[in-house]
Amino acid sequence: MIEHRKGISIALVLIAAPPLVTLIATAHQMIGTGGDGLIRASAVTASSPPATAAPKAAAPAPASPPASAPATAPAAAPATSPASPSSGSSGSASPAAAAPTPVPGRSAQDFTASRPAWEDYLRGADPAAGKLLAANGKPAAGVQACVACHGQAGVTPTGGIFPNLAGLSSEYLAKQLADFRSGTRIQPLMNTVARALTEQEIGQVAAYYGTLAGPPLHVGEFGGEAARKLDLQGDGARALPACANCHGLRGMGEGVLLPRLAGQSREYFTDQMNAFRSGARQNDDVGVMRAFSQRLTDSEIQALAAYYAGPAPQQK
């Protein structure tokens, strides 16, 4: 009986010993890292720059000139001390004094949101100054008045491939002008115009047009059932979400960067959808419009163009 109990005790010890040893070793390792608690994230520091080869020893000073040398010979210039501020060499600089190599990119602990540059264009932008710029242009820089193509109130009177700007948000317009300026969006006329405007002027024009309400519309009267279904339901079989998810019901607009489609001419809508399909326009967020436009047929694009355009503009 005693031997039986002793065997059970030995077996229990052998079973419990490995986990216990592991637990003790782990606790010792955690406590040994230092800090206020058991575990503390180590501070991440920039790696030291690679060590450079030690500078070669300076050549020995030339021997004294022979006695026959003329007494008026100029004295040799004193060797510049490596520690002298005027010296371009850093060979003798103390490693402790050397500045750490900057680490490119953002820190892993930097959780601030990355903001686009065009947001700064709108800060303090004066819509009144934008209105003057839209009406008069910038002749000294070769920029014609915006109203020449986009209409007096931001509505192109006869349609065509020029978009209506009234009803679009200031943020969307500032982004598009910034994209034209940088070349992210290509349209030769608008690339020239945007590059001739300053950042402040882009903000002013965008702020002005952002104050204009779009014209009264009767959207959804044209385009047929196919366009209505794409707007309201999409097509799950082709991974096409409803257009209204981003652009609002009947294209009346949703977020500040999701533009209003209602009231844009059939020609402009079709032109932009074809540009997305071909890749000629690439400033859509993560390529969503390029992907969606490639899943639509030509007839569906035409139907949506009629659906969002509403009645044709009256000729004056």
Image (tube, rainbow, N blue to C red):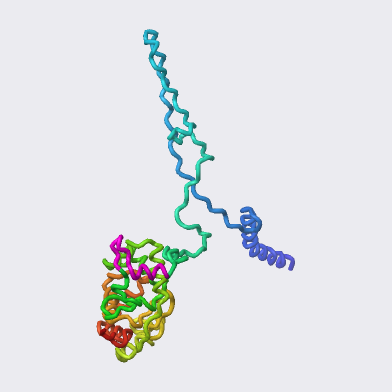
In the image, 238 versus 30, the foreground residue is 238
Q: Position of residue 119 (x, y in %)?
A: 44, 66
Query: Toward which corner of the image does residue 172 lie, by quadrant?
Result: bottom left
Query: Toward which corner of the image does residue 67 lie, by quadrant?
Result: top left
In the image, 248 versus 159, the foreground residue is 159
Q: Residue at x 72, y 67 (%)?
A: 5
Residue range of the region highlighted in magenta in the rendering: 128-144
Is residue 109 one of those drawn in magenta? no
Q: Position of residue 313 (x, y in %)?
A: 29, 85
User: From this viewpoint, is residue 174 visible?
Assistant: no
Is 32 left or right of 70, judged from the image as shown? right
Q: Position of residue 50 (x, y in %)?
A: 45, 43
Whether 206 is drawn above or below 38: the answer is below
Is residue 131 one of those drawn in magenta? yes
Whether 50 is drawn above or below 229: the answer is above
User: From this viewpoint, is residue 275 visible?
Assistant: yes
In the image, 212 versus 219, the foreground residue is 212
Q: Residue furthest right?
A: 2
Whether 316 is drawn above or below 181: the answer is below
Q: How many marks?
A: 0
In the image, 48 versus 262, the foreground residue is 262
